[in-house]
Amino acid sequence: MRTFLLATLALLAGGCGTKLQNFLYTPKPETTYHVPADLQPFATQQTFTASDGTPVAAFFVAAATPADRGVLYFHGNDANMDNYWDRVEILHGFGYPVLTFDYRGYGATPGTPTEPGLYMDARAAVAALHAHSELAHFCYYGWSLGAAVAYQMALEAPPDCFVSEAAFASVQQIADDAADLDLPGQWFTPDRYDNVDKIGHIDETAGRQIPILLLHGVDDTFIRVNHAELLIAAAQAAGEPITVYLVPGAGHSTIPQEGGSEYDSLVQQILGAPLGGP
């Protein structure tokens, strides 16, 4: 009986693993990008190399006026950079230079997405942003899966500030929400992205306070608001300086639209002045 049960669980985990892996990553390989017309005069396509030799496709979008505070934007799990220019446009409109990049398997970056692989790509992106000598301050903005990658980078290479939009608490919590099964997350996928643990250690590893803005849609049916509540509780328990905006009426991808002027104000407040900020 025990052998049958273990075999059944293994089959179940294998099937759910495929589904959860597809939930985490839905890349679209692409060799050509379509930069919006308003960003084209400021956008420069780049390629930098991850530690395992993977060439990482990226764009640096310069600010329209002088700025010394740059933002590294980590996009979500779907398609590639072409699916996420709207956030870059928002940040550029606020006056910030922005570096954005495609994870392995996405767009023109070759490979297969995995948690360790995305971290390697992100480390190369962090180094590329720091290579801009005109920048004195560095901020992270992560959306959904991108927020999970940004949480890891916040531990490894602490920024001056961090915007977390529509983040999930952990892969385990996604599995719990979807399947309501008391199985460990690694039954479903080797990737863990334990953001609820990491958020409580950002200041500790940085040795200083890093302001965090946590944004989540109250009506998000993709990553439910309970994930935000877990992240908030962990940050508050650790004494992290966190600002929270749970946006009424917003789904997974409509926080800027539904948040309106409040969203604009909070993002600019947490990121700081584009030029000459503290």
Image: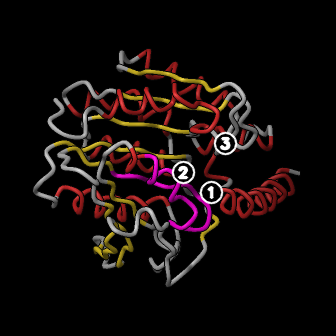
184, 213: nearer the viewer: 213
The residue pinned by badge 3 equals 252
Image quadrant containing the C terminus:
top left
Labels 2 & 1 near each other (Cβ < 8 A): yes
The mark closer to the camera, 3 or 1, is 3
Q: Residue most toward the bottom?
A: 31
Q: Amino acid at mark 3?
A: His
Q: Nearer the viewer, residue 188 or 99?
A: 99
Q: CA separation, marks 3 and 2?
A: 12 Å
SS at badge 2: helix
Q: Quadrant of residue 122?
A: bottom left
Tell me which residue sits at (65%, 41%) in the image.
254
Q: Is residue 267 left or right of residue 95?
A: right
Foreground mark, 3 or 2?
Answer: 3
Q: Is residue 200 above or below residue 14?
A: above
- Judging by the rendered image, the residue that carries numbered circle 1 is 24
**Disc number placed over residue 200 in the picture, else none:** none
Indicate the amino acid at tag 1. Answer: Leu
Residue 227 x/y as whole percent: 62, 31
In x, y percent, where is residue 144? Answer: 56, 46
Q: Which residues are magenta?
A: 72-90
Q: Measuring 53% from the left and 54% from the top, which residue is drawn there?
A: 86
Tell me the residue that label 2 is attached to: 145
Decide whether residue 65 is among the magenta residues: no
Residue occupying image coordinates x 26% and y 40%? 159
Q: Is residue 9 left or right of residue 204?
A: right
Q: Which SS class for mark 3?
A: loop
Looking at marks 3 and 2 on the same chain, the residue that comes earlier in the sequence is marked by 2
